[in-house]
Image (spheres, grey):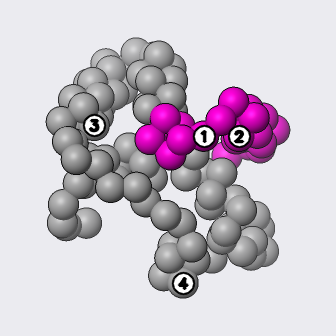
Amino acid sequence: MTGESLNYLTIFFNSSFFRFCYKEYFPELLGEARELRKVFFENISIMPVQDESWYKEILEQILSKKKEGLSIDRLQNQVEENLFDLYGLNSDERNLIRSELNSTVY
């Protein structure tokens, strides 16, 4: 991938928020696979960010901890809360996303 905001996009596309969107907007194929086409990506609004430095820093921390075999749960929670705030999700919406993903095996 090339372009602007790659750290933010990497964080976004690896978030539970995107996995929820993926499950909702991308049609299921045989074998629980999903169809990845531009037309389905266009249904997902990606909020712009003014300052990508937080995303770059958190992404570096996640990658570092993963290389060391350490837990990234705390960092993932920070990412999720940041994205939920960015999109202005209320507590019901946040709980829906969390509950949907907890019931889904990836």
Q: Position of residue 60 (x, y in %)?
A: 23, 31
As measured in the structure, the alpha-carbon distance from the residue carrying label 1 to the one carrying label 4 is 24 Å
Magenta stretch prevailing secondary structure: helix
Q: Residue 72 versus residue 41: which sits nearer the camera?
A: 41
Q: Residue at x 43, y 60 (%)?
A: 46
Pointer 1: what residue?
Answer: 89
Q: Please identify the quarter of the rendering in which residue 48 is found.
A: bottom left
- 38 left or right, relative to 27: left
Sequence order check: which comes first, mark 3 or mark 1? 3
Q: Position of residue 106 (x, y in %)?
A: 67, 46
Q: Position of residue 13 (x, y in %)?
A: 45, 52
Cα gap from disc 2 to disc 1, whole angstroms: 6 Å
- Which is closer to the viewer, label 1 or label 4? 1
**Does 4 appear in magenta?**
no
Q: Label 3, on which residue?
A: 55
Tag 1 near tag 4, CB within 8 Å: no
Residues at badges 2 and 1 in contact (C-beta under 8 Å)? yes
Under mark 4, the amino acid is: Val
Q: How far is the residue under mark 3 from the one under mark 2?
A: 23 Å
Apparent side of residue 7 relative to residue 100 in the rendered image (left or right)? left
At label 2, the amino acid type is Glu
Residue drawn at 28 percent across, 37 percent down: 55
The residue to which callout 4 is attached is 39
Give neighbour class at mark 4: few <14, some 14-19, many 20+ (Cα, 10 Å). few
Disc 3 marks a residue whose amino acid type is Tyr
The answer to whether any part of residue 60 appears in the image is no
